[in-house]
Image (cartoon, rainbow, N blue to C red):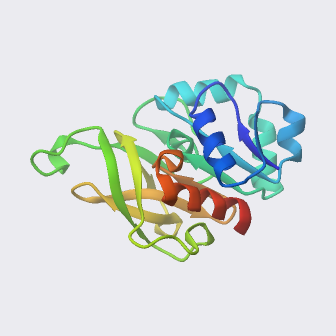
Amino acid sequence: MIAIVDYGVGNLASIMNMLKKAGVDAIVTSDPVLIESAAKLILPGVGAFDTCAGKLQESGLLPLLNKKVLEDKTPVLGVCVGMQLLLEGSEEGELPGLGWIKGRVVKFRPEMLPAGYKIPHMGWTDVILSKPSRLFEGMYEEPRFYFVHSYYAQPVNPEDILVRADYGPPFTAGMENNNIMGVQFHPEKSHKFGMKLLSNFVNNY
């Protein structure tokens, strides 16, 4: 069973609908008993980093999530701000992230972008795989996903970078460290590419 962690934020219904289309048995839940029994976890997140980090703290689920992911090695997929929460913190706020992957979240700055590029980065963008991953096994050619974000991950260890995308300069669009995975884009809004990625997460880990 796949548990989409409900801590008060996130695109829960959209993720659930995409998983249903992929024929996956999943639930949206904040119930510690169901989360404890889940084979895999999806951590959503939309909006500001501190809002998501604060609600996650308030949920009381942090000790359970740390145990599931760090001790039990349960596969987890962070989506959008859910991926940013995997890191230690963000320029967007002051609250700590989960710290499951070393690094921080930084802001796109106008001076780093070519003329005419706007913040936030919004729309369909191609991604380039940085290392082999079961998350992209059998992926359609020329994979592209839907992004909406002003901040991006900057992991300390380059080996944690799973995929990159270009918005002027390249940026980290996805991370993977053993059982811990995250994507900055929205697979639930990315049609066949997103469905394939979610199916791979469910079936390959």
Is 118 situated left or right of 19 in this image?
A: left
In depth, the one of 54 and 2 nearer the eye is 2
Residue at far left of view: 115
Q: Is residue 98 visible?
A: no
Residue at x-position 45% and y-position 49%: 185
Whole-percent x and y of residue 11? Answer: 56, 34
Q: Residue 176 versus residue 67: which sits nearer the camera? A: 176
Residue ID at (48%, 46%): 186
Residue 40 in sight from this viewpoint = yes
Residue 174: x %, y % from top left = 49, 58
Left or right of 45 in this view: 152:
left
**Residue 31, relative to residue 174: is it above or below?**
above
Residue 80 place in picture, x, y as percent: 50, 43
Q: Is residue 45 left or right of residue 130?
A: right
Which one is in front, 150 or 136?
136
Residue 121 lies in what quarter of the image?
A: top left
Residue at 42% from the left image edge and 73% from the top image edge? 141
Residue 29 image position (x, y, % from top left): 77, 33
Query: What is the tally of numbered marks visible in this picture?
Result: 0
State which quadrant residue 200 falls in. Answer: bottom right
Residue lying at 52% horizontally and 50% vertically, measured from the top left: 187
Which quadrant, please, contains the C terminus?
bottom right
Is residue 79 placed above or below 46 in the rendered structure? below
